[in-house]
Image (cartoon, rainbow, N blue to C red):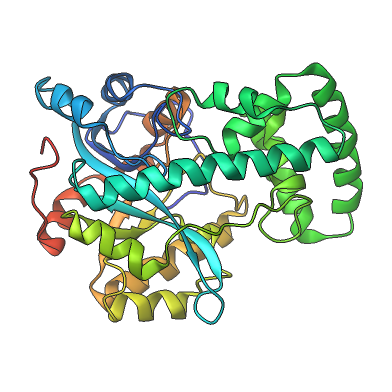
Amino acid sequence: MGARGPGSIPGAPIMIKGSENLHSHTLFSDGKMTHKETLDVALANGCAVLAFTDHDTLMPVQIFKELKSLEHKTKWISGIELSVQDPPGKLKGSFHVIGLFVDPSNFALQEHCKKMLVARRAKAENYVKMFTDLGFSLTVEECLAQAGEGTVGKPHVVSALIARPENVELLKKHIEEFRIKAQSDSDLQKDYDEALERSKRYNIGQFVFPIFLRPSGGAIKAVDTISPTLEIAVKLIRDAGGVAILAHWHTVKDVITIEVLEKLLNDDKLDGVETVWGISTDPSRDPAEWAKNRKLIRDAVSRTGAVASPSLDAHLKADYELLAKSDDFASQTVGMTKKILEKAKVSKEFSTL
């Protein structure tokens, strides 16, 4: 099958059973389902293998044991998504690294997650202050309530923000200003178009990210002072028995150029990179650019012999439903987990494979 652009769905698709997704989130970070619900939804939509990769959060050991005893038809892998912040003089940016096949009881990784839990709350407090300074009504308690048992993050702040009708009205004014400004800036226009499309699928809160929380040029910035460097993050993952994968390269390609990425892979600073990434989250709505980025990554993986990983970056039931409808995307993910095991030589102990 020929490659299609992100979100391109045939009229009457045949579900590709056996698809794989090694990047998913639960209620323990910014997902909307429990671990068991995620497995059930994945199975219903033809997904044979998934990895639980919550933000700076390991699978609770008790849940790990419970799921192990289920003998669920959809196989799963214990994972994590670590936030990384490299200091000036190195990569000069923030990004995420996925850890697959990690031991959820690993002491060092558990201690790191505890520190990040505190740091994420402090960052949420910072966001609340900045939004209230802009005239929005918001409290830290509202953000924590959105997170529930999970680690609080930007999506929870956004959900709490738009829960108040007065905030939605104020946001609409900012959206209109952003729309006008985007008409004379092609990069902002792309951000606006993406947010508009995602707002139709999800909610108006999708505009909060490009208007206020954009890494470069956003109105609100929360300084990251605790996330580890790439070297430390990768060591944490490897020491926990896992393999370290760069997440959604297409969102950080200006920070980690393809040349930098290839050097990191060649120098064993990373084990691999996501090569089939989220159809529901790809910011490029230009099929040509999307195809170009995918080719750059695949060529880099081919030259370096690195690990290639499939990523839906799933948070919702709708993401797995989209996977089931997109036969081209789904078919490309089949068999990728087996290749990771062959290349990375990691243990299957912390999975049900």
Q: What residue is rendered at 13% in x and 55% in y? A: 341
| Rendered position, 231 above or below 46 | below
Q: Is residue 75 left or right of residue 168?
A: left
| Rendered position, 169 above or below 182 | above
Tell me where residue 298 sits by quadrant: bottom left
Q: Position of residue 198 (x, y in %)?
A: 64, 35
Towards the viewer: 196 or 227: 227
Q: Is residue 40 left or right of residue 274?
A: left
Give the total number of marks visible in the rendering: 0
Q: What residue is rendered at 14% in x and 39% in y? A: 351
Q: Is residue 345 left or right of residue 272?
A: left
Q: What residue is rendered at 41% in x and 47% in y? A: 115
Quadrant in which the C terminus appears: top left
Q: Position of residue 249 (x, y in %)?
A: 47, 61
| Rendered position, 269 above or below 241 | below
Towards the viewer: 44 or 111: 111
Q: What residue is rendered at 72% in x and 28% in y? A: 204
Q: Position of residue 148 (x, y in %)?
A: 48, 22
Residue 166 shows in the view: yes
Towards the viewer: 151 or 264: 151
Q: Position of residue 94 (x, y in %)?
A: 53, 62
Residue 203 shows in the view: no
